[in-house]
Image: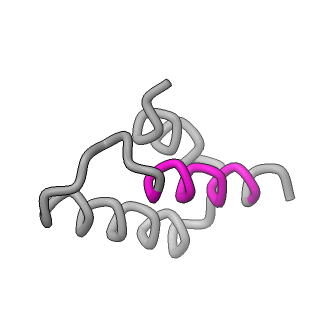
Amino acid sequence: MNPIYEISNLAKNIPSKHCRSFTNSITDLLSKGGEHYESYVFQQLRCAKKFVED
């Protein structure tokens, strides 16, 4: 599972304000040397899924 790909698939169902927040926080992590598969990225995926479920 690629969490960034999963978030991008959910993006159409998430309000744009929150979608930008997920994108910005992940971009910040990656720009500081973080990896795609860090627990923080999976945490962001869980939050994105909650928006879609609610």
Q: If the image is split into quadrants, where does the C terminus sit?
A: bottom right
Q: How many marks?
A: 0
54 relative to 12 in the view: left or right: right
| Farthest residue, direction top | 1
Task: Give the colour scheme of this rendering.
Answer: one colour
**Near-viewer residue (20 or 48):** 48
Residue located at (65% from left, 52% from top): 46
51 relative to 27 in the view: left or right: right
Query: With respect to residue 8, does 43 lie above or below?
Result: below
Residue located at (52% from left, 48% from top): 42
| Farthest residue, direction right | 54
Residue 21 horizontal/vertical position (percent): 44, 72
Residue located at (83% from left, 50% from top): 53
**Near-viewer residue (2 or 12):** 2
Residue 24 horizontal/vertical position (percent): 33, 69
Residue 22 sits inside the magenta stretch: no
Query: With respect to residue 37, does 22 lie above or below?
Result: below
Residue 45 sits inside the magenta stretch: yes
Residue located at (46% from left, 41% from top): 8
1 relative to 54 in the view: left or right: left
Residue 23 horizontal/vertical position (percent): 37, 61
Q: Quadrant of residue 32?
A: bottom left
Q: Quadrant of residue 27?
A: bottom left
Residue 2 horizontal/vertical position (percent): 43, 30
| Residue range corresponding to the magenta coloring | 40-50
Q: Main secondary structure of the magenta part?
A: helix
